[in-house]
Amino acid sequence: MEGMKFVLATEDNSDYKYYIESVDREERDVLIKGWVIAESEVPVEVELVNADKKSVSDGNVWRKTRIDVRNALNVNDDFNAEFLIRFDRENVPGDVVYVHFSGENAKDMYLGIDVKKLDFSLTSFGKVVGFLGNSPIKNTIRHIKNRNNGGSVGNTLDEMYAQWRKENNPTASDYEKQRNTVFEYQPLISISIPLYNTRIDFFKPIMDAVLGQTYSNFELCLADGSDNDYLGKYIEKNYPDDRIKYVKLEENLGIAGNTNVALKMATGDYVMLADHDDLLEIDALYEIVKALNEDPTLDIIYTDEDLVDEKGTFFSDFKFKPDFNLEMLRHRNYICHIFVARKSIMDEVGGFREEYDGAQDFDMILRCCEKSDRIYHIPKVLYHWRSHMESTAGNADSKRYAVDASVRALQEHYKRVGIEADVEATDIFIILKTTRKIKKEELVSIIIPSKDNVDVLDKCIRSIVDKTTYSNYEIIVVENNSTEEETFQYYDKISEELSCVKVVRWEHEFNFSKINNFGAKHASGRYYVLLNNDIEVISPDWLNRMVGYCQDESIGAVGAKLLYPDDTVQHCGVVVGIAGFAGHVFNGLTRQDLGYFGRLIVQQEVSAVTAACMMVDANVFNEIGGLDEEFAVALNDVDLCLNIRDKGKKIILDPNILMYHYESKSRGTDEAPEKINRFKSEIKRFRDKWKKELEEGDPYYSPNLTLDRLDCTPRRLDERFTLVEEIEQGENK
């Protein structure tokens, strides 16, 4: 189906900007996904019609906000630009259906979609071929398409996830084995669910899933704040099970109040939280109890999740989560569902607080995680968050008050744990920004290796001096075998002009690790910044933010978000294991992109950051002996970060620290045979030194995500690392 065009030519209509991202077939259903906004900046109505321009009765249209479109086009956040249309193909005859756009003061538009070409196979999917009107965000869309396709022709992200689910979901025989498993430790799990005017077509699936669990020692605690007792009557008629505890409240107490009643009903060893309109996998409790049998000391457990549409049949937006990442949790509630806590901890924190309604789960999870470090992540999708227009999943704007509650919840968390910081909302729903307050403006030593290219170096130094708001720093330029007289004249000039700059000479072969270690010996700062000479400062508060983190004794290093000059991403954290050794994810996405799970904008803990711009606690750096000098060029920064983590210190990535990176102009390319051989030898050494870490996987990167690409798409069963295989085969020879 390569090259097939699903979107037909239509009349030119400058009233709209739009894009059809995918046209997929799933069993009998056809799914059309895209986005649209009106030039007049008014909401756009979207419906599916037939050739007679009559609405297709079973066409289900799902809408939600689209942050990348909003950022790129600078439009209002209330427009719900994205749409997903789902319809039963057998009920819609004809070769073409039309997506109808309409809006106030905008001419109606009918976009023809050729669906006949999907009919020859119920399981085939077409390559995404879209039509982009007069839009200034072609690059954004190009990157979105690249990300969604994952470099695999003909596969959309939804298709890749559907394939992943097919390969990873348990079989009927697996479920039977689970039911026959007798665990040594069989804790009672209390599943607490608040109810409020729940639709029966939403309520029945979660009831069936709970009562169909392959682990049976649970109780279901339901607190019903509905306007009438229809749910109670439905339960009594359809679910005669002693494990169900149901209470009809005299009045609706709100989500926090209703949930707290359900929590008070719980008598189990652990409490599991769920929403009344979502879906649960029937092996959810089995996996939780399995983890508890492997480690009964666990206090908190969470799992992966995704979104399911209103019909409960289309699964998308997978959330393959990292292992516990407190810094990420602080800035977005990535844990969310499923959340399980030891009941004694839930009792201690007092459940939910009504004053944080809208962010009540975020507030409660923070308070629970303050009580224990025995927190475990199950990397399996066991929960499906139903997305519909009344839910936060379907419409972020339906609960905008959640933003203010989230800010207050995080601010209170910092007070409880003794961190002085300011919290603010970002323009991305549910993502927060923290600025840690500096206790003392300690001296920072900025170490910059350099060889010739004085224009590049001067741009770097001038950007530091002209833009940096932090005042107490020194710049140490480590000269390495420059040959141009102009370079040495520049050194004399800049040192005389700027008292904060001094030049020291490393008169040996190029070795990035040795050069930086040499520079550190001439540094007087409490903190070191390892900085390439081809870096240009964007964020004036970059040193303030780095020092704010590094003054925390639990943190050993801080990294930045680096951009190429065309405003695409060069670095935003390193994943250990990419390509069989380590790599930067999201490389090449735009500055405006959120990245998978918001990782391009969320402050978070990572396994490593690049030394092109990295602040390191000087005491920690010196304690571990600096950079490993056997890594002359590659992987020395990743190795340094892993050594820092071995000392029990954290590595923080703060995407609010922005820099331009002109990518190793002084050193040139690595295409020469000797450089390629050196690179291979450093990969080999890295794999030998960190074998255990590579086998266990990066804790801040899900084992369900790909390691052979940079786009955070689902991992394929056939992944292989060609370069690593070549290296290992060479060793065997």
Image (cartoon, rainbow, N blue to C red):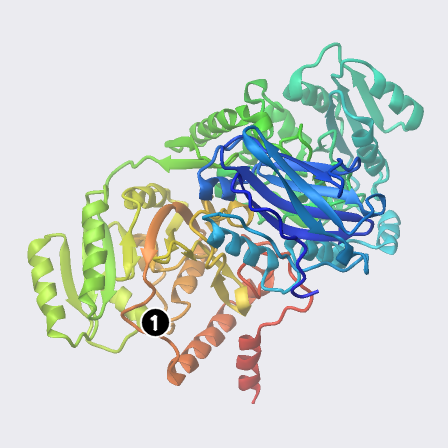
Give x and y (percent) for residue 295.
Answer: 68, 47
At label 1, counting other C-alpha atoms closer than 10 Å, the crowd grade (few under 14, some 14-19, many 20 or more) is some
Which residue position holds label 1? Answer: 629
Q: Is residue 332 above or below residue 653?
A: above
Q: Quadrant of residue 64?
A: top right
Q: Is residue 313 above or below residue 9?
A: above
Nearer to the camera, 54 or 6: 54
Give x and y (percent) for residue 130.
Answer: 60, 53
Give x and y (percent) for residue 420.
Answer: 37, 32
Left or right, 587 with reference to 226: left
Q: Is residue 162 above or below residue 680?
A: above
Q: Quadrant of residue 424?
A: top left
Tally of numbered discs: 1
Secondary structure of the residue carrying tag 1 is: loop
Give x and y (percent) for residue 137.
Answer: 47, 49
Nearer to the camera, 697 or 715: 715
Nearer to the camera, 87 or 153: 87
| Residue at the extreme bottom of the image, as rendered | 733
Quadrant in which the N terminus appears: bottom right
Q: Specify the amino acid type for callout 1.
A: Glu
| Residue at the extreme top of the image, as rendered | 250
Quadrant in which the C terminus appears: bottom right
State whether residue 524 appears in this view: no
State whether residue 670 appears in this view: yes
Residue at 76 percent of width and 20 percent of height? 197
